[in-house]
Image (tube, coloured by chain):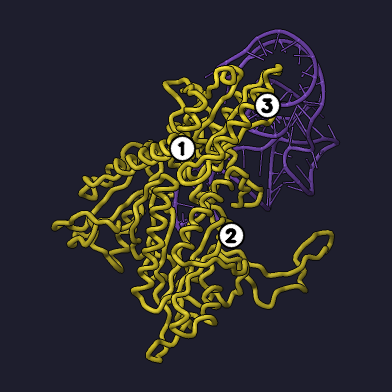
Amino acid sequence: MKNALPVTRAENFADWYQAVVGEADLAEESGVRGCMIIRPWGYGIWQRMQELLDRRFRETGHENCYFPLFIPLSFIAKEAEHVEGFAKEMAVVTHHRLKMIDGVLQPDPDAKLEEPLIVRPTSETVIGAAFQRWIRSHRDLPLLLNQWANVVRWEMRPRLFLRTAEFLWQEGHTAHATAEEAREETLRMLEIYRSFAEDALAMPVVAGEKPPHERFPGAESTYSIEAMMQDGKALQAGTAHYLGTNFARAQSIRYQTEQGDLAYAQTTSWGVSTRLVGGVVMTHGDDDGLRLPPIIAPRQIILVPILRDRPEDSSVLEYCDSLAAELGASSALGEPIRVLADRKPGRSVEKRWGWIKRGVPIICEIGARDVAAGSVTLIRRDRARQGEKIDFTSLARGEFVQRAPALLAEVQSALQAEARERLRAGIRSDLTTLAAVEAYFNESDDSESFRGWAQVPWARPEGAALDSVERQLKALKLTVRVAPLEQAPLPGERCLFTGAPAREWILIGRAY
RNA sequence: CGGGGUGUAGCUCAGCCUGGUAGAGCGUUUGGUUCGGGACCAAAAGGUCGCAGGUUCAAGUCCUGUCACCCCGACCA
């Protein structure tokens, strides 16, 4: 079978991932370590995510704003755990001018900054400084902000979308009067991420809380949504942190209560990033490239005219244009259909494979025969092949226009169902001993074979006991993903690691 | 940041060990034949061999440094 990609998922999942990112025109290397060029198709997907999330943030009372890229070093230094967590991966600006010295353009020694600036790895500290000025009274609370921005973390091992030195994200920052309110906010945003991932990205996730050693630096509680990729590895797809008063204390974010006392504000932060694009690739991609859920596809339907340098070409193009206009006037999944007649020069077969690789949900080929018969020939990307051959369907034009919204909805739910089944089947709850866990994750040396997650009983060890668990997990290249919010019954189980009475179920697995 | 690998035409790569005229396939352009399920023939264009030094009569090839990417660790959205 000839696939559209040079490598299959089964052969080498990592190479396959890179092939999809490249062949689907999502992104490419920039020549700057860890920094990627996001191409229009990849950026279009991110913009769809932005539109949909932004709407949900505003519906829940948040306002957008923008804070600076540079943060004075002294700001970062305020929260001890925060510094420790991020110190190793920060880009630092030390000069404000270049100078030609001995024929080499370099930072001007006379232009050294009094105080170095760091490029934000996240904005808790700058936003906190503003909160300190803006929050005086209980009447100023809650303060619900979000910003869409780029951040920089000097990662050691970058991978396009999954771990880049610079990435795009949104970071929500809120301040509240009470811990209860702040915790509610944290879980509210986590639920927005969970439902967004599941409904819009068709990427089902498990929402839960991270164990202490996996917390965001400076957080009281860290929650995340975890998605299962097609190789069984976990991808942390979004996080929400309850910060307690840790940042408020470090930055003096205080307000006067109704009773007139001074109290520290309770803060939260939460974010998702362009990593989600990588998650969509690894959730839905197949050996012919990307498959996009219609809700986030920049184009949901592509019309490829089949032109033959003959007089009837013009009628084919007219047919495509009028069909595109007709489709664009109707709605699917609650929004106008995004359709494009691909009029660019080039061979139609090449165009078709290009759109298959880019993952467009419905690809139509319109030739003279369709024009004559008043029909449309289409490929549903979620099931593009029947056996080795492309699965073409022919519909009367009117029927196609009428059914297009339902078809798009079907593609969305088919991708979701497929991913949901993989997540369900990929979680083992029958590995009840450490030996069984070891056997499962170490079986054979074939690192490419699928290994999902294990759900195991957990006693919430701390201190030395937790350190010991970490070592055991690390030896198996495992990490604790989350303790799911939705817990199965736990009748008298003992912690898989410590043997102490279990307090909850956790998921462990390999991760990106 | 440690260990290993790679960097040569738009793309995928050969050539490097053993220094001596810059190569192939795909793509592109042109002409022709085909042509509704990844066509064929012919011709042409296309490269400061990642970058900077060094050794040499001569460097893609050997040496040193550096940048980027890939794999394995440590780190992480």
Residue closest to the far left: A492
Q: Give the residue type at disc 1.
A: Pro
Q: Residues within 10 Å of mark 2 (few under 14, many from 20)?
A: some
Q: Give residue A343's position: percent from left, percent from top.
A: 66, 31
Q: Which chain is purple?
A: B
SS class of the residue under badge 3? loop
Ranked by sequence position, the earlier of labels 3 and 2 is: 2
* Residue topped by disc 2: A150
- Quadrant in the picture for residue A175: bottom left
Q: Give the residue type at disc 3.
A: Gly
Chain of the residue where label 3 is placed in the rendered structure: A
Q: Residues within 10 Å of mark 1 (few under 14, many from 20)?
A: some
Do the numbered discs 3 and 2 sit on residues whose CB atoms are within 8 Å? no
- Whether residue A457 sits left or right of residue A32 in the image: it is left
- Quadrant in the picture for residue A299: top right
Q: Do labels 2 and 1 share a chain?
A: yes
Instruction: Name the one closer to the observer, A466 or A118.
Output: A118
* Residue ID at (55%, 66%): A64
Q: Give residue A285's position: percent from left, percent from top.
A: 47, 37
Look at the image and give the colour of chain A: yellow
* Residue topped by disc 3: A346
Instruction: Name the one closer to the observer, A427 or B29.
Output: B29
Ranked by sequence position, the earlier of labels 3 and 1 is: 3
Q: Give the residue type at disc 2.
A: Asn
Instruction: Name the one closer to the observer, A234 or A378.
Output: A378
Q: Give residue B1's position: percent from left, percent from top.
A: 56, 57
SS class of the residue under badge 1? helix
* Residue topped by disc 1: A405
Q: How crowded is mark 3: few (under 14 residues within 10 Å), some or many (20 or more)?
A: few
